[in-house]
């Protein structure tokens, strides 16, 4: 199982999903209408590194974070 | 490692410690202190941060050959007049100090995994208008 | 008015006072702290300053519409590890803060009527190599 | 009488001279061989304002300062 966490203002509890790569995760997450808006503007971290390739494989125990637009300071 | 404080940062105490600890060998210290300003009827700001990636982001600034950079940030509520962000750059000469402090703060604003909320009547409202979309965003867009 | 200290500036004490006194209404405070660095066998630096024209020079920076600038400088001997120059810029936003701190310090270095000496074996040696000729210099040259 | 002060590293006590303008002061000061080197690189203040015109008139009680190259900070 892959754990997915939604950071900052995305008001959603972490979920666990059974997916083999980010493409599969994308399909799962886009079923949630409220999440779609956030996915449009959010970056994706796998095991705390930002990834930019949809083919990134995911294995059991991997952690994905969804990072909405940031504003520190 | 980024220093993290619940609520406002004790600015002077932290600056005092950094100044004593790091000034040897450097000719210039340039701090940047972000102060929560009264604006649009807010009572303050509030912050979420994701520490593992914040520390990861900070690593490339922590080990510069010609500068020492230190930073502190708040999580949770920070009232008007308090400080939520504090950093300082130590360099031999002022020229690289001015360059680094600006580059560092701009990179911080654009890339540090921190989320800001306005505090209005006790409610936390995401500061969407001031938020920056990260590089690579939209990867999971349908 | 420039704040003047005999010997090293009590940096944290002064920053504490400035921070408390001026932060209201501003979103950023950017100090610059000049530290006497061990270099070429010096024990420290020493300074002369001409206060009437130093204050006159500072006037154009004291009353900016969009910033508050404060500064302190030492006269006499300042040992290695101590600070001889301290200033801070308060602005609403960081952008003008970065611009002002750099412009201010560069103008200070080029135009403030202060003279620097290296302290070597108890002697005061004019730091000719680091000194800048003022605009209009040479008027009385033969 | 016009009072002339030599600032910073110029090791010279203040003097009082009877001159009508900076051109006359220039002649007086250039008689001092040690001062000549400093005058080449020094700016001139009259009553604490930098001046750049040799015709600047001087009157009784005026104060002139000779400002060698500066280096604060």
Image (spheres, coloured by chain):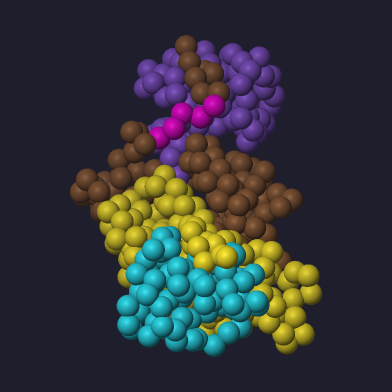
Chain colours: A cyan, B yellow, C brown, D purple
In the rendered image, is residue D36 in sight? yes
Is residue A66 shown left or right of residue B3?
Answer: right
Residue B86, position in %: x, y? 50, 69
Q: How many marks?
A: 0
Give the residue displayed 33% in from the left and 51% down from the top: B92
Region of the chain picked out in magenta, as a range: C131-135
Foreground residue among B103 and D20:
B103
Q: Quadrant of the N terminus of chain B?
A: bottom left
Give the residue displayed 50% in from the left and 86% down from the top: A14
In the rendered image, is residue C6 in sight? no
Whether residue C132 is in magenta: the answer is yes
Q: Quadrant of the C terminus of chain B?
A: bottom right
Residue B44, position in %: x, y? 68, 78
Foreground residue among C18 and B55:
B55
Give the residue displayed 52% in from the left and 18% down from the top: C140
Residue D18, position in %: x, y? 61, 20
Residue C111, position in %: x, y? 53, 37
* Main secondary structure found in the magenta portion: loop
Whether residue B122 is in magenta: the answer is no
On the image, which quarter does residue B116 sit in?
bottom right
Is residue C77 shown left or right of residue B137?
Answer: left
Foreground residue among A59 and B28:
A59
């Amino acid at each position: 199982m892959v754990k997915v966490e939604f950071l900052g203002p995305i008001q959603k509890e972490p979920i666990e999903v059974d997916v083999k790569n980010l493409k599969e995760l994308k399909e799962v997450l886009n079923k949630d209408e409220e999440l779609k808006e956030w996915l449009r503007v959010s970056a994706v971290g796998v095991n705390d590194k930002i990834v930019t390739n949809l083919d990134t494989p995911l294995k059991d125990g991997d952690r994905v974070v969804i990072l909405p637009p940031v504003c520190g300071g | 490692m980024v220093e993290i404080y619940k609520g406002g940062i004790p600015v002077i105490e932290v600056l005092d410690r950094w100044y004593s600890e790091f000034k040897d060998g450097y000719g210039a210290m340039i701090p940047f202190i972000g102060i929560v300003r009264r604006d649009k009827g807010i009572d303050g700001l509030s912050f979420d941060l994701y520490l593992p990636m914040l520390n990861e982001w900070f690593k490339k600034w922590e080990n510069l050959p010609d500068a020492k950079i230190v930073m502190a940030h708040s999580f949770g509520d920070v009232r008007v007049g308090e400080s939520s962000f504090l950093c300082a750059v130590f360099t031999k000469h002022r020229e690289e100090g001015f360059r680094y402090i600006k580059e560092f703060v701009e990179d911080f604003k654009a890339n540090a995994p921190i989320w800001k909320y306005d505090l209005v009547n006790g409610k936390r409202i995401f500061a969407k208008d001031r938020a920056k979309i990260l590089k690579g965003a939209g990867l999971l867009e349908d």
